[in-house]
Image (spheres, helix red, strand yellow):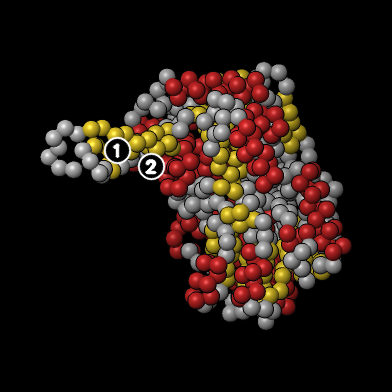
Amino acid sequence: MAAGRGFSSLVARAVRSAGARPSAFGTSVSSHQASIRNDGIRRLGTAASALEEPIAPPVQVKHTQLLIDGQFVNAASGKTFPTFDPRTGDVIANVAEGDAPDVNRAVKAARKAFDVGPWPKMTAYERSCIMLRFADLLEKHNDEIAALETWDNGKPYEQASLVEVPMAVRLFRYYAGWADKIHGLTVPADGPYHVQTLHEPIGVAGQIIPWNFPLLMFAWKVGPALACGNSIVLKSAEQTPLTALYAAKLFHEAGLPPGVLNIVSGFGPTAGAAIARHMDIDKVAFTGSTETGKAVLELASKSNLKPVTLELGGKSPFIVCEDADVDQAVELAHFALFFNQGQCCCAGSRTFVHESIHDEFVEKAKARCLSRVVGDPFRKGVEQGPQIDQEQFNKILRYIKAGKESGAKLVTGGDQIGTKGFYIMPTIFSEVQDDMAIATDEIFGPVQSIIKFKTLDEVIKRANASRYGLAAGVFTQNIETANTLTRALRVGTVWVNCFDIFDAGIPFGGYKMSGTGREKGIYSLQNYLQVKAVVTPLKNPAWL
């Protein structure tokens, strides 16, 4: 693992330190009861009762309007929509509901900022300084932003504050560093010509981000686009609109010119579609489901044929080989699936386990699942909060029902927790077959499918037999086995003896129906640049 590399293992270290199995949460829990520790955290088994009363969030909602041309404004229609607390289903705030007229206003502001405004005409160093100042402000407001993220999304506060906000800060500093290092080439020609390439900003970028990691996806999209000198119209997810508005306000405090970054909250079929089809948007980046990604691509192609990058769904295999240390494999496979309530596009949701260690793995995975701490995400030590909303909650329960009905063995979990909020028991199925819905479809929830395999060739074939190709995990002590699998698996990322390592410089994206293009690292800059060749004749050159 990359445990010694500092930031690269921040996710794993911080989350495990908040909920590590051996120490603070040592005793196992019966599948027919829930025990309560001294600090009031409920450790949940398959018959757990309702959770404790929710903790009051330590933050106030300050921004609920659209941010267009540097100003907070109401939607043109005057409409608002509610954003909900996943812990209770109660309304947190009513947020301006952007639609096509608001997207038009935002695009007009972004076009002006790009065509005649100061942003692309600033030196790259000046742009870098603004991004660095923003990163400092993000770091300064870490606790407030983390609290908003937890309140709006349901993810554990410790995860948001110790992992995700620092990762966003790091990413903006990374791209601030790239701003003045983007340049073209001098190309030799077969004749008396001087040839150079210019790497130019693409223009107005439309960006549509998801609800599972709102702040991080904001960073993944906005960072490279601004580093390249573009202006932006960004639509936040309707489930989680709050942190994008807060962060964008901080960007303007850092000196970002008006119109460079515009935030439109609203719904996919209205505001999102308006971005995808807009004739004056030069590029679209989308993260979300594969089906919605297809719709975005179609709208872009039917308008001005704008380029589109897509980071879509996944059904990632996590392969535990016969030489694995079972205890370590169980812990890592648990993290790979259950992190962020299972709401990760790259979650290791197909856990392939070699037949020689399968039964031991299942029993230990069950024990680990029963010790998972589920509760109010603002409470210290909680590993798992609620799912995002009623729709996702119902979808996960339907897949759990389908798993039972298809003949998979329910090892533990399999039901909701309590009657308030969107909490679901950590769930494990064994005896899962490749054609079952729980093995083929992206559930996006805390449901682990354990699948037995015999040989390396077999598991390669079965792991690749998916319409998705986003990521994979490999757990082995044999370097030859690791090398074989990393080259054979048709996915965009393979984590060997680790999982969910997301350095700013590591590219992320998928094969097949998991998307096109790459996020993060140097590769993401290509999404926001045009390459122009400039050819000039040379008269009596001293050399060619």
* Picture residue at 76% right of the left edge, 46% below the top: 392
Disc 1: CA contacts within 10 A as few (<14), some (14-19) or many (>=20)? some
Residue 11: percent from the left, percent from the top? 55, 55
| Residue 513: percent from left, percent from top | 63, 51
Q: Is residue 289 left or right of residue 119?
A: right
> Circle 1 is placed at which residue position?
196
Discs 1/2, front: 1
Q: Earlier in the sequence, mark 1 or mark 2?
A: 2
Residue 451 in sight from this viewpoint: yes
User: Tag 2's secondary structure?
Assistant: helix
What amino acid does circle 2 point to?
Trp
Looking at the image, is 73 positioned above or below residue 239? above
Q: Secondary structure at mark 1?
A: strand
Specify the farthest residue to the bottom: 356
Q: Residues within 10 Å of mark 2 (few under 14, many from 20)?
A: many
Identify the residue at image location x=65%, y=20%.
101
Q: Nearer the viewer, residue 256 or 180?
A: 180
Amino acid of disc 1: Gln
Q: Nearer the viewer, residue 463 or 80?
A: 463
Task: State the residue position of label 2.
Answer: 178
> Viewer-proximal residue, 328 or 179?
179
| Vertical side of 115 occupied by 83: above or below | below
Q: CA distance from mark 1 to mark 2?
A: 20 Å
- Quadrant of the image for the C terminus? top left
